[in-house]
Image (spheres, rainbow, N blue to C red):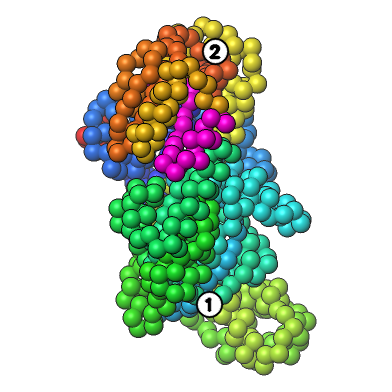
């Protein structure tokens, strides 16, 4: 798909900019417009804002050519939005339901206090004393994803959650749907983790979900998750281990070889062979093999493999060695080097506060938020509720059966003001009647509680109404989501679905552009890689004697003491796919190559000349190119349908600011 699909969608500057424009002269207003699509103007400020945002770390992009190219893409984007609106796509109930759902989510960061508090530090430490065992299902979507991708991910995770709640096995759902690669081997089980081990939204959802239940969808920088909490236990602190690893390739034969190898190593370790010697000779973890297999200390949740983590923490005595176990990386044995309990709060407080400063948990309670918003929005108390409550409330309120009365104008006193907005006693009556519940409070206390809730609600509502005027980024983001949903719906209908369903058009496009889909020169080869040269010499001798290296022959090699590290790759390769192949002649033959302390035997069976690919060999790329072709045709139609006028003075203003 074209890069234009992924432009950050921006908004026209809001009320404050509009006021400035209204006060300017007609010529000044005209100069602030960069271009119009039909009768819809796009401001210079809008374009500059989005250009800077999308090139924040790309100083080289600030050239006239780059700005002109970007302007062309931006005009194309606005043409699509104009087309979506002309079809009424922004007027449907389904659209507004989806948009308002996102808008509610977008408000949250602006309606939450973010100061670091003692309670956050204490919360973090209390969680460090407790470990959660949870499984999750992930649908990936990046933080800065296009709205269409975010919308798709949210729908997927909601559908999966419904299946889980209805009784389908969570682990099986994780294997089938989760985009966390480890789900295929661990059924989504993340093992045990504690505070700061997961991103904060995930952590909070896990700690706030009861054992045996499933959380609502939670958004992190990785995407959308649902979490099933399996268990909780006291924290185990940190552990330091060393390990020996044997990698496993996804074949039954290699898996058996790796298993046999790790058990042989395990026997040698228990038999007294020095651990450092075994790690250096046999471990296939290149980062630790020359360091006696030693890993950095870790706590629960920091190790990506649940099996590795649990095997490490199960060891009690320094120097004890685990039984062999398998992870997604291969077979391992681990040796305990050191264990340490969780340190006291006083020792960790400084570190915790520092981590909170870098963490998304910098949020405080609602009272702090309300206090801040009162100051920012010029809240003023006019009449305290306790001055009038005795005249209008009775014990029916605490039983949840109180009925409001209609006040005369002289009775409807003003309670407070937010900015220039006044809130009166009748407003509170409406709130109290709608929100009263049967309770055990004393009447004055309950009236005050209801009033506090009423006051807080109105402060939040007032702030909510000011958000787009108050925060430029929020205003931009709201428009981004709104136009993003429209763009997704339109592109799905006009381009993406058509390219997939139009098989005749796809075939025709492929045949007209066959020269664009070519194989480079390839070879058909088998690559044998071993830790010892004797293995390669044995294999070379067998190949030169035209001996077929069937599984039973290779098994005989695997079972010998010196050949347990043999690895085999076979297939058709272009030069870029296997750098090792650049070290041998590209001709039929048998070649030896030593590389990084390993020995290779390359058996080239055939050299395949460059030539055309068939459609089934490159269909994904062809579909993408066909979508581009369809889009280019469609954009030409849109430019004929809608007038596009670029304001010369507006363009000069863009150059003045950006170049």
Q: Name the disc covering residue 614, or none.
A: 2
Is residue 41 toward the left or the right of residue 92 in the image? left
Q: Quick one: which residue is furthest to the top in this view?
A: 512
Is residue 158 shown above or below 445? above
Q: Name the disc covering residue 564, or none.
A: none
Q: Name the disc covering residue 234, or none.
A: 1
Magenta stretch bounds: 551-579
Q: Position of residue 601 (x, y in %)?
A: 38, 26
Label 2 SS: loop
Q: Position of residue 296 (x, y in %)?
A: 35, 62
The picture quadrant where one finds residue 584 is top left
The picture quadrant where one finds residue 70 is top left
Is residue 106 shown above or below 337? above
Note whether residue 480 is visible.
no
Is residue 475 shown above or below 395? above
User: Which mark sits nearer the N-terminus, 1 or 2?
Assistant: 1
Tell me the quarter of the image containing the C terminus: top left
């Amino acid at each position: 798909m074209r890069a234009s699909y992924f432009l950050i969608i921006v908004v026209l500057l809001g009320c404050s900019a509009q006021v400035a424009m209204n006060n300017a002269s007609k010529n000044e207003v005209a100069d602030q417009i960069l271009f119009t699509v039909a009768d819809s103007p796009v401001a210079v400020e809008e374009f500059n804002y989005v250009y800077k945002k999308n090139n924040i770390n790309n100083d080289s992009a600030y050239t006239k050519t780059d700005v002109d190219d970007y302007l062309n893409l931006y005009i194309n984007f606005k043409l699509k939005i104009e087309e979506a609106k002309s079809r009424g796509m922004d007027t449907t109930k389904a659209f507004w339901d989806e948009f308002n759902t996102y808008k509610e989510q977008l408000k949250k960061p602006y309606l939450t206090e973010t100061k670091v508090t003692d309670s956050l530090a204490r919360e973090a430490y209390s969680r460090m004393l407790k470990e959660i065992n949870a499984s999750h299902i992930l649908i990936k979507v990046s933080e800065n994803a296009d709205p269409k991708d975010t919308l798709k991910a949210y729908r997927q995770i909601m559908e999966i959650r419904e299946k889980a709640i209805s009784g389908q096995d969570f682990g099986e759902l994780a294997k089938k749907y989760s985009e966390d690669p480890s789900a295929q081997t661990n059924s989504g089980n993340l093992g045990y983790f504690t505070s700061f081990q997961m991103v904060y939204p995930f952590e909070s959802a896990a700690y706030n979900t009861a054992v045996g239940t499933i959380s609502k969808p939670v958004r992190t920088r990785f995407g959308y998750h649902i979490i099933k909490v399996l268990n909780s236990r006291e924290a185990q602190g940190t552990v330091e281990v060393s390990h020996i690893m044997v990698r496993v390739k996804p074949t039954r034969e290699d898996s058996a070889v790796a298993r046999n190898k790790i058990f042989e190593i395990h026997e040698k370790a228990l038999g007294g062979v020095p651990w450092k010697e075994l790690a250096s000779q046999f471990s296939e973890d290149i980062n630790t093999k020359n360091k006696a297999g030693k890993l950095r200390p870790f706590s629960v949740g920091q190790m990506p493999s649940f099996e590795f983590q649990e095997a490490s923490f199960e060891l009690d005595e320094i120097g004890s060695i685990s039984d062999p176990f398998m992870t997604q990386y291969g077979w391992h044995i681990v040796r305990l080097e050191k264990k340490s309990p969780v340190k006291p709060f006083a020792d960790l407080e400084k570190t915790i506060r520092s981590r909170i400063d870098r963490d998304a948990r910098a949020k405080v309670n609602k009272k702090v938020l309300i206090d801040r918003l009162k100051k920012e929005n010029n809240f003023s108390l006019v009449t305290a509720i306790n001055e009038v409550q005795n005249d209008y409330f009775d014990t029916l309120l605490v039983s949840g059966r109180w009925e409001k009365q209609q006040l005369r104008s002289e009775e409807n006193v003003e309670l407070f003001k937010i900015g220039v907005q006044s809130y009166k006693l009748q407003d509170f009556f409406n709130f109290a009647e709608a929100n009263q519940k049967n309770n055990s409070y004393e009447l004055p206390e309950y009236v005050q509680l209801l009033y506090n809730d009423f006051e807080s609600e109105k402060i939040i509502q007032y702030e909510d109404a000011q958000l787009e005027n108050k925060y430029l980024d929020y205003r931009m983001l709201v428009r981004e989501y709104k136009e993003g949903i429209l763009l997704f719906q339109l592109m799905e209908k006009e381009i993406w679905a058509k390219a997939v369903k139009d098989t005749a058009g796809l075939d025709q496009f492929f045949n007209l552009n066959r020269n664009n889909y070519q194989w480079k020169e390839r070879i058909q080869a088998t690559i044998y890689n071993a830790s010892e040269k004797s293995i390669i010499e044995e294999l070379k001798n067998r190949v030169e004697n035209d001996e077929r290296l069937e599984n039973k022959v290779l098994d005989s090699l695997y079972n010998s003491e010196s050949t347990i590290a043999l690895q085999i790759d076979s297939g058709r390769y272009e030069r870029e796919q296997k750098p090792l192949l650049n070290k041998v002649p590209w001709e039929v033959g048998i070649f030896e190559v030593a590389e990084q302390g390993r020995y290779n035997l390359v058996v080239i069976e055939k050299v395949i000349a460059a030539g055309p690919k068939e459609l089934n060999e490159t269909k994904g790329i062809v579909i993408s190119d066909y979508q581009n072709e369809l889009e280019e045709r469609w954009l030409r139609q849109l430019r004929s349908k809608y007038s596009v006028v670029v304001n010369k003075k507006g363009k000069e203003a863009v150059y003045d600011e950006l170049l």
